[in-house]
Image (cartoon, rainbow, N blue to C red):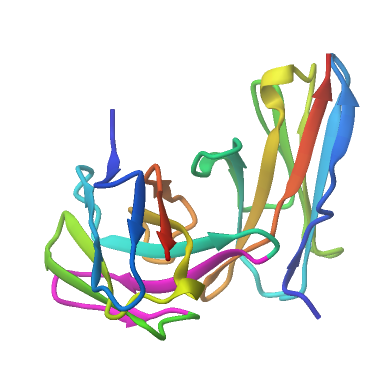
């Protein structure tokens, strides 16, 4: 069964900490995405990548960065966590560049205190 | 004008009835349309996609696309309590845009 695996289901971090969220896919997809999902705001795209070493800003990249050193792994980094980054973070991969046919990971619920 | 609109619900439907979920979009050049189902506390999963005008059926699910009127619908026949979830519509032209979802509640 194809999978997108996010390393943590729940995380609690302190304000100002550097936070790493890891995502690994086993489908050999080139395209990977990071979203956050908040009540009333829906899914918002943070960053995406169409190839190794490549990254593009999404709609809300401020306060985040990403790393893609290997095709199967796409990491989201919160440089200095803040309480307004408390959210559900979802990683997705897709065969097509424009996405749409996403496979999502199970999500990481991050709480910043 | 919101780019992809869905009624937030909740939409309550008796078990065994047809649930009808609607989505309108503003970009007339949109080309691909997707429906995702998201159970509470879980991540979205793709259940249907449609590219051409008309209907596309998969089991109890039917996606309907009307590009002239700029709407896409999802029909769920013989609704089951397990269909209770939030349904997200996604539309693609040069980027993917998600609606905020419609909460569906199937009444036993």
Name the foreground residue: B106 vs A7: A7
Q: At x 19% / y 42%, what residue is drawn?
A: A26
Location of the N terminus of chain A by quadrant is top left
Q: At x 84% / y 47%, what residue is drawn?
A: B9
Does the segment drawn in magenta span residue A43? yes
Name the foreground residue: A42 vs B58: A42
Eyeballing the image, is B86 above or below A82?
A: above
Q: Quadrant of the rendered structure where residue B103 is? A: top right
Taking B67 as reference, is A78 left or right? left
Q: Quadrant of the rendered structure where residue A38 is? A: bottom right
Read off the magenta span.
Answer: A41-58
| Residue lying at the far bottom of the rendered structure | A62
Q: Position of residue A9 (x, y in %)?
A: 35, 44
Location of the C terminus of chain A by quadrant is bottom left
Taking B24 as reference, is A12 left or right? left
Q: Position of residue A91 (x, y in %)?
A: 36, 56
The answer to whether residue A93 shows anywhere in this view is no
Name the foreground residue: A2 vs A18: A18
Q: Where is residue B41 in the image (x, y as percent from the top left)?
A: 54, 40
Q: At x 38% / y 64%, what residue is drawn?
A: A34
């Amino acid at each position: 069964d194809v999978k997108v695996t996010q390393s943590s289901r729940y995380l609690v971090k302190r304000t100002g900490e550097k936070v790493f969220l890891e995502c690994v896919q086993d489908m050999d997809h080139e395209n990977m995405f990071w979203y956050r999902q908040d009540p009333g705001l829906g899914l918002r795209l943070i960053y995406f990548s169409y190839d190794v070493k490549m990254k593009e800003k999404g709609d809300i990249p401020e306060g985040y960065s990403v790393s893609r050193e290997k095709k199967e792994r796409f990491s989201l980094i919160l440089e200095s966590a803040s309480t307004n980054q408390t959210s559900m973070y979802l990683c997705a991969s897709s065969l097509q560049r424009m996405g749409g046919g996403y496979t999502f990971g199970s999500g990481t619920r991050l709480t910043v205190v | 004008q919101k780019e992809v609109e869905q009624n937030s619900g909740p939409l309550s439907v008796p078990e065994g009835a047809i649930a009808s979920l609607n989505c309108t979009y503003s970009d007339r050049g949109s080309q691909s349309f997707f429906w995702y189902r998201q159970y509470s506390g879980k991540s979205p999963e793709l259940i249907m996609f449609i590219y051409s005008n008309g209907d596309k059926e998969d089991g109890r699910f039917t996606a309907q696309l009307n590009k002239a009127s700029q709407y896409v619908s999802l029909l769920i026949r013989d609704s089951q309590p397990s269909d209770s979830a939030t349904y997200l519509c996604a539309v693609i032209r040069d980027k993917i845009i998600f609606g905020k979802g419609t909460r569906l509640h199937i009444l036993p």
